[in-house]
Amino acid sequence: MTEWILVHPDWIEVRKADTSLFAPQRYLDDGEREAISLVIELKADALLSDDGAAIKEARRLNIPVVRLFTILESAAELNLLDLSTTIDKIRNTTFRLPPIEIIDAMLERDRKRREG
């Protein structure tokens, strides 16, 4: 397990998922398979994922999916973060961003919301 998760806030519960709960119909990395298994096991409301294969598998299982950038845009609407700054910080990581057209549309909606 990576070091950053060894010391975590009390509200985070680290647990191993029961991956026998479903058989994926496409290849999933271990993390995505465990995430979907946890959604099933915990009867969670949705899967948080930006992985294409995991999203397809979740949809096959009728599991709602929430993408990170949807959460970020919602957080910006609640003035919990600056969307432009957050996206700039993410650009400096190895995280794969959505297509530039989607990012531009989000930033434009955010700009209009802040001006309005």
Image (cartoon, grey):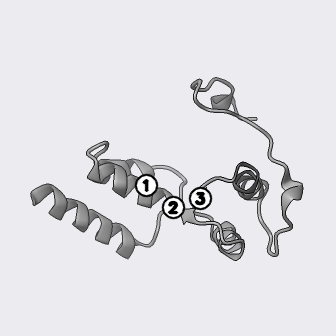
Relative image position of residue 2 (x, y in whole percent): 71, 34
Quadrant in the rendering for residue 63: bottom right
x then y, percent, for residue 68:
49, 56
Report how far apart the C-alphas of labels 3 and 2 lie in the structure.
Answer: 10 Å
First along the sequence among labels 3 and 2? 3
In the image, 95: left or right of 32?
Answer: left
Q: Would residue 24 be found to the left or right of residue 106 on screen?
A: right
Q: CA distance from mark 2 to mark 1?
A: 7 Å
Residue labelled with disc 3 = 46
Q: Amino acid at mark 1?
A: Ile
Which residue is located at x 85 percent, y 54 percent?
A: 19
Q: Residues within 10 Å of mark 3 (few under 14, many from 20)?
A: some
Q: Residue at x 46, y 68 (%)?
A: 98
What residue does disc 2 label?
67
In the rendered image, residue 51, in percent from the top left (x then y), is placed at 62, 65
What residue would you read off at disc 1? 71
- Taking the image as shown, residue 50 lies to the left or right of residue 106, namely right
Compared with residue 3, is residue 95 higher up or lower down, i.e. above or below?
below
User: Which of the two labelled residues, at mark 1 and mark 3, occupies the earlier sequence position?
Assistant: 3
- Image x and y of residue 1, in percent: 76, 35
Q: Which mark is residue 59?
A: none
Q: Residue at x 77, y 65 (%)?
A: 28
